[in-house]
Image (tube, grey):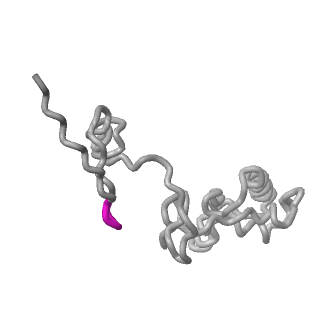
Amino acid sequence: MTTPAPAPATPASPAPAGQPAPAPAGPGTGPGPGSGSGPGPGGRPNQGGFQPRGPRPAGGPRPGGRPRGRYAPRRRVCSFCVEHVKLIDYKDFDRLRRYVSDRGKIEPRRKSGVCAKHQRALSNAIKRARHLALLPFVPMQTIRSGIRR
């Protein structure tokens, strides 16, 4: 008895330009974890890992983070570090007054843009200047208007 000869396999024609080649069928190539296609764990499509970006056009998205909106200004550098100030003088009340709010409170770092090291020294200098009556503890409007609590 003779068995029929299998039909000769036709060579696969190359895929037309712009279309991906069909994936070969076999174990580990269907949809599922680790296949690289379809939703991965958590229901999100698997993007396939790191994809390098080319040069971005001016005004495009910022690499490595969210875009800066109108409400998030650029981070300021510490003015004391820029001027190479060794010691923040408590007698320099004109400079210290810039870091005190109109309500008499010491401005936080996120608002003043001062580094942590100089913020600690600035806070001590403001407290020392208040103690020696160079800076007021309370705002001037409260003192003038005579408001009592």
| Res. 58 image quadrant | bottom right
Q: Position of residue 64 (x, y in %)?
A: 55, 57
Viewer-nearest residue: 104 or 79: 79
Residue 109 visible in rendering: yes
Question: Which part of the image, by quadrant, shows the N terminus?
Answer: top left
Q: Please give left or right for residue 46 compared with residue 68 in the image.
A: left
Q: Is the magenta stretch mostly helix, strand or loop?
A: loop
| Res. 92 image quadrant | bottom right
Viewer-nearest residue: 50 or 116: 50
Residue 131 visible in rendering: no
Q: Give the range drawn in magenta.
A: 15-19
Q: Which residue lies furthest to the right in this view?
A: 86
Q: Residue furthest top?
A: 1
Residue appearing at x 32%, y 41% in the figure: 40
Residue appearing at x 50%, y 72% in the figure: 60
Q: Position of residue 115 (x, y in %)?
A: 72, 55
Above/below status of 20 relative to 2: below
Above/below status of 88 relative to 47: below
Viewer-nearest residue: 76 or 3: 3
Q: Please give left or right for residue 10 compared with residue 60 in the image.
A: left
Q: Residue furthest front?
A: 1
Residue appearing at x 32%, y 55% in the figure: 21
Q: Please give left or right for residue 127 compared with residue 74 in the image.
A: right
Q: Residue furthest bottom?
A: 58
Residue appearing at x 75%, y 53% in the figure: 127
Whether residue 127 is in magenta: the answer is no
Viewer-nearest residue: 103 or 34: 34
Q: Position of residue 125 (x, y in %)?
A: 79, 55
